[in-house]
Image (cartoon, rainbow, N blue to C red):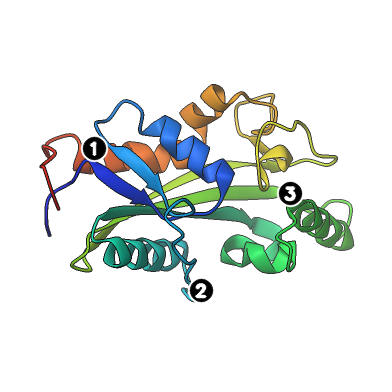
Amino acid sequence: MAGLSKDWVLATHNSGKTRELQDLFMKHPVRLLSAKDLALPEPEETGTTFEANAELKAIAAAQATGRVAIADDSGVAVHALGGEPGIHTARWAGEGRDFDIARRRVDARLRELGEGVSRRATYVCVLCVAWPDGSARTFRGESLGTLVWPIRGDLGHGFEPMFLPDGFAMTYGEMTPDQRRRVNARAAAMRRLEEALFGATALTAGS
C-alpha cells in the first residue's frame, strides 16, 4: 500500500455527498477532486454490502486516475423491512433516482404492515479509501433512529428529511450542514477514517 497523496479523487457524482465530504476534509491537507469534474464513469454497484459497493467505486476511481480515491456508500436499513432499502436504494428511487419516490415507497410499505409496526431504522455509511495498486480500507459508521412522516426539513438529501436520530428533536433534514456532519453516520465513519489514516500517518508527496 502506497502513501497518501494530497490530491484525492472523490468517487461520487452525488452533489450532496460531495459537499458534505468536502466539508469533513477541510481540516486535513487533502484536496478532493470530483469524479464528476473529472468525467469519470460511475461503475455499476454490484456488491452485496455497503462495504463492497464503496470499495468497488473507490478502486475504480483510483485505478482510472492513478490517485488515492475515496468513495461513500450509504443508506437506510429499515428494521421492519428486513434492512431494505439498504444497498438497494436506487431501485426504490426509480430510474430518475427520485428520493421523494423512495421515501414515499418506504412509508407506504410500513403502513401496509399495520399501525403498530416499528419505524426504527439504522442509517449506515461506509467510506472506502483506495490506492491505484488495488488496495483499500473501509470505515463504517452507523446512526440509530426512527422514520417520520411527513418528512421534515429540506436541508438534507436522500432519506435524511425522514430520519429522526435517537436523542435529537430534529431530523437530519432540519439540521444545518454543520450540525449534521457532527452526528450522522458519515461523521462516525469519518472519525474512524481519521483515526486510522491521519492519526499516525504523515501525508506524502505522491501515491
**Residue at the spot x=46%, y=41% of the render?**
186
Q: Residues within 10 Å of mark 2 (few under 14, many from 20)?
A: few
Residue 44: which disc?
Answer: 2
| Residue 175 place in picture, x, y as percent | 64, 25
User: In the rendered view, does 131 fall on the left or right side of 99?
Assistant: left
Q: CA distance from mark 3 to mark 2?
A: 30 Å
Amino acid on which the number 2 mark rests in the picture: Glu
What is the C-alpha distance between the residues marked 3 and 1? Answer: 33 Å
- Residues at marks 1 and 2, CA–CA distance in whole angstroms: 30 Å
Residue 70 visible in the snapshot: yes
Residue at the spot of label 1: 195
Ranked by sequence position, the earlier of labels 1 and 2 is: 2
Name the element at disc 2. loop
**Residue 185 seen in this snapshot:** no
Disc number placed over residue 119 in the picture, else none: 3
* Comparing labels 3 and 2, the label whose residue is closer to the camera: 2
Looking at the image, is 176 positioned above or below residue 109?
above
Q: Number of numbered discs present?
A: 3
Of pointers 3 and 1, the one earlier in the residue sequence = 3
Marks 3 and 2: CB-CB under 8 Å? no
> Does residue 181 appear left or right of residue 122 in this picture?
left
Q: Residue at x 85, y 40 (%)?
A: 150
Q: Nearer the viewer, mark 3 or mark 1?
A: 1
